[in-house]
Image (cartoon, rainbow, N blue to C red):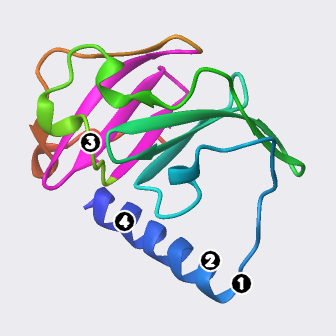
Amino acid sequence: MWYQKYFLFLSVLAIMSLILPFKVPIKGSLAQNFTSNIDASFLSEEDNKLYLLKGDQYVRLTFYVGQGATMDSGYPQPISNWIGLPINFTSNIDASFLSEEDNKLYLLKGDQYVRLTFYVGQGATMDSGYPQPISNWVDPPDS
């Protein structure tokens, strides 16, 4: 299935980061608990914002390609701020990605996923009919 290839890709990236370490400079301060062991992340290319999710919180960084990032003021914030999430999707997310084509944010946890409508710079609202089992995902977003 497509998601097995996606997780294989993520695994390869994780191994590469161990073999070929590199650092993205973060200008200014970053919340102390966001300096390692990030659960998930996604990039909104529309406004160059990088989101890091860890535990029950997330931070938003303004990302400058090839130069680093700066944490936006007012962060970290609770993942539960995203409207409509079931309690089990408000912490410890396994993976996330944003489909820029339709502004849909996907959060994966265990054997389930949720889809949210992502509002650039404003947050997200869960779409109706979620969560769903990953095994039922027959029409994945285009990469």
Residue span colored magenta: 95-120
Pointers 4 and 3 in contact (CB under 8 A)? no
Q: Amino acid at mark 3?
A: Ser
Residue at image position (47%, 20%) is 102
Q: CA distance from mark 2 to mark 1?
A: 5 Å
Mark positioned earlier in the residue sequence (1 or 3): 1
Q: Which residue is mark 3?
A: 91
* Residue 118 magenta: yes
> Residue 24 placed where, x, y %?
77, 58
Q: Amino acid at mark 2?
A: Ser
Q: Which residue is mark 2?
A: 17
Q: Amino acid at mark 4?
A: Phe
Label 4: state its secondary structure.
helix
Q: Amino acid at mark 1?
A: Leu
Q: Is residue 26 visible?
A: yes
Nearer to us of marks 1 and 3 is 3
Residue at image position (54%, 35%) is 59
The residue positioned farthest toward the bottom in the image shown: 19
Q: Which residue is mark 1?
A: 20
Nearer to us of marks 4 and 1 is 1
Mark positioned earlier in the residue sequence (2 or 4): 4
Mark positioned earlier in the residue sequence (2 or 3): 2
